[in-house]
Image (tube, grey):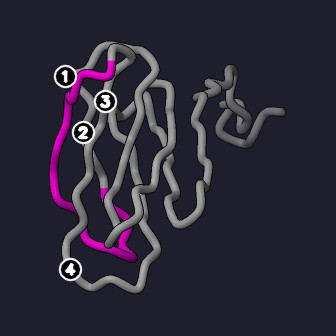
């Protein structure tokens, strides 16, 4: 389709970016490999900061930080190689866990 300026109004190619979003109990994880981030939200009644730990395939701790509850939080993964990771968040006496591929 050509518009009046002579340029195509439709893109000549499409780029499909694989992203993944899953919810595990009160933990939602969204992976954005193009940006090099995961976004997560922990829904809980707790008001204090929560302990987030990410492990690689060999169960080695690669990221550890505090995250606020009930808010979307971004975690940069740019220093990590591609692979399968496990994210764990401690909420009171419970530990929420999910796996993601980056």
Image quarter where the C terminus lies is top left
Q: CA distance from mark 2 to mark 4?
A: 22 Å
Tell me which numbered mark, 2 or 4, is placed earlier along the sequence: 4
Q: Nearer the viewer, residue 17 or 72?
A: 72
Binning the other alpha carbons within 10 Å of mark 2 as few (below 14), some (14 to 19) or many (20 upward) gives few
Quarter of the image for residue 70 reads bottom left
The region drawn magenta spans 59-73
In terms of secondary structure, where does tag 2 sit? strand
Q: CA distance from mark 1 to mark 4?
A: 28 Å
Q: Which residue is mark 4?
A: 48
Binning the other alpha carbons within 10 Å of mark 4 as few (below 14), some (14 to 19) or many (20 upward) gives few
Q: Which residue is mark 2?
A: 76
Q: CA distance from mark 3 to mark 2?
A: 14 Å
In terms of secondary structure, where does tag 1 sit? loop
Q: CA distance from mark 1 to mark 2?
A: 8 Å
Q: CA distance from mark 1 to mark 3?
A: 13 Å
Tell me which numbered mark, 1 or 4, is placed earlier along the sequence: 4
Q: Which residue is mark 1?
A: 79
Residue found at x 19% / y 36%: 63
Tell me which numbered mark, 1 or 3, is placed earlier along the sequence: 3
- In the rendering, which numbered label is found on residue 91? none
In the rendered image, residue 63 lying in the magenta stretch gets the answer yes
Residue 32 versus residue 89 in the image, above or below? above
The answer to whether residue 15 is left or right of residue 59 is: right
Residue found at x 58% / y 29%: 17
**Dots 2 and 4: beta carbons under 8 Å?**
no
Tell me which numbered mark, 4 or 3, is placed earlier along the sequence: 4
Residue 97 percent coordinates (x, y): 46, 47
Tell me which numbered mark, 3 or 2, is placed earlier along the sequence: 3
Quarter of the image for residue 36 reads top left
């Amino acid at each position: 389709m050509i518009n009046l300026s002579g340029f195509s109004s439709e893109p000549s190619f499409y780029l499909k970016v694989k992203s993944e979003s899953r919810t595990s109990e009160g933990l939602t994880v969204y992976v954005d490999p193009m940006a090099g981030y995961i976004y997560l939200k922990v829904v809980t009644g707790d008001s204090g900061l929560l302990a987030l730990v990410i492990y690689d395939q060999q169960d080695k701790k690669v990221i550890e930080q505090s995250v606020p509850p009930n808010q979307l939080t971004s975690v940069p993964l740019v220093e990590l190689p591609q692979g399968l990771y496990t994210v764990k968040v401690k909420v009171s006496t419970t530990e929420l866990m999910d796996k993601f591929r980056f």
